[in-house]
Amino acid sequence: MDIVLTLGGLLTLVVGAELMIRGAVDMALRARISPLVVGLTVVSIGTSAPELLVSLMAAMKGSNAIAIGNVVGSNIANISLVLGACILIYPIPVERDAHRIHWPVMMVVSLLFTAMFWNDDVARWEGALLVLILAAYVFWMVWSSRKASGQPGAQPVEVTTPVWRSLVFLVVGIAGLALGADWFVEGAVGIARNAGVSEQMIGVTIVALGTSMPELVTSLMAALRKQSDISIGNLIGSNIFNLLGIIGVSSMVLPIRADHESFLMDMGFMLFISVLLYPLMRLGRRLGRWQGLVLLGCYLAFMVLVIQRG
C-alpha cells in the first residue's frame, strides 16, 4: 500500500505542476507581475504548501525533529537537487534581481533562523516576527514589479486565456501538488519506518525529499517549457517561505523545541549550499550544466553524510 501511495502521489504531482505553471503565468501577466516575481510568490508558496502542512502536523504531534528536519532538508534539496537537475536539462539565465536582491534575502533569513533555533526553541513571538517579515517581503515584491511594469517603455503582454480557466488551473494545480505530496510522504515514511529509520533521518531525507517533489516537478516543467524565471524564482522563494512561513506559522501555533546540536550538520550544510549558489550565479550569465553537476554532487555528499550519521 505504501508503494501505491508513493507512485500515485508522484503522478498527481506531475499533473498539478503542469496546471499550476499555466495558471500562474497567465495570472502574472494579467497583474503585470514579472515571471520571476510570480515564481518567488505564487508558485513558491503553492509548492511549499506540503512542507507547511507536514511541519505543522509534526509540531502539533510533538515530532519536532521531523518539523525542523523537513524544512532544513527541503531547503538543501531545493538548491542542490532540484536546481541542479533543472539546469542539467535546460541552462537557466540569471536575472540581476535574483542575485542582487532575492539571494541576500534568502541568506539573511537562513542566518536569522539559525540564530533563533540556537537556544533549542523557536518561540511564538519569534514565529510572529518571521511571518511579518514574509508579509513585508511579498508586498514589496508585488509592488515593485507592478511599478516597473507601468514605466514608459514597458511592453504590455496580451493574455488570451479566459480568467476563469487560469484560476481553475492555478487552484487545481496547487491542490494537486498538496495532495500528491501528502500521498508521497505518507507512503515514503511508511516504507522508511518499516525499515527502522530514525525520526530525524526521516525528516531530513524522506520527508524533505517528498515535500520538495512539488518544487522539483514544477521547476522541471518550467525548465522544459523554458520558463526559466519561474524555475530559479520558485526555488529561492520556496527556501525563503520555508523558513519564514513554515517555521513562523508552526511556532506560532505551538513553539518548536528540539536539540539544535543534533541539527548542526544539517543547518551547516543548508548555509553552505546557500552561500555556494551565489558564485555559481555570478560565473557567467546563466546557470549551466557544469553548475548543475556541482550542485547534484553536493546533494549526494549530503545524503552520504546523513546515512553515515544514521
Image (cartoon, grey):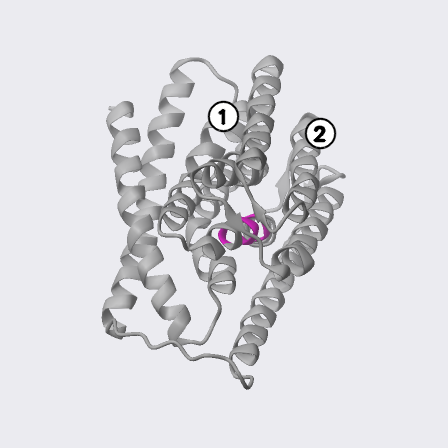
For disc 2, the marked residue is: 264
Q: In this view, does 206 lie to the left or right of 123?
A: left
Classify residue 120 by image quadrant. Answer: top right
| Residue 93 place in picture, x, y as percent | 54, 52
Name which residue type carries label 1.
Answer: Ile
- Most foreground residue, 289 or 66: 289
User: Which mark, by number, is residue 164?
Assistant: none
For disc 1, the marked residue is: 202
| Residue 31 place in picture, x, y as percent | 42, 76
- Most foreground residue, 137 or 19: 19
Question: Can you say which quadrant of the picture contains the C terminus?
Answer: top right
Q: Which stretch is magenta? A: 234-240
Q: Is residue 101 left or right of residue 68?
A: right
Q: In this view, does 245 lie above or below 33?
A: above
- How packed mark 2 is, by other alpha carbons closer than 10 Å (few <14, some 14-19, many 20 or more), is few
- Most foreground residue, 39 or 126: 39
- The local secondary structure at tag 2 comes to helix
Q: In this view, does 172 lie above or below 65?
A: below
Residue pictured at 35% horizontal, 51% vertical: 225
Between the C-alphas of marks 2 and 1, the distance is 16 Å
Question: Can you say which quadrant of the picture contains the N terminus?
Answer: top left
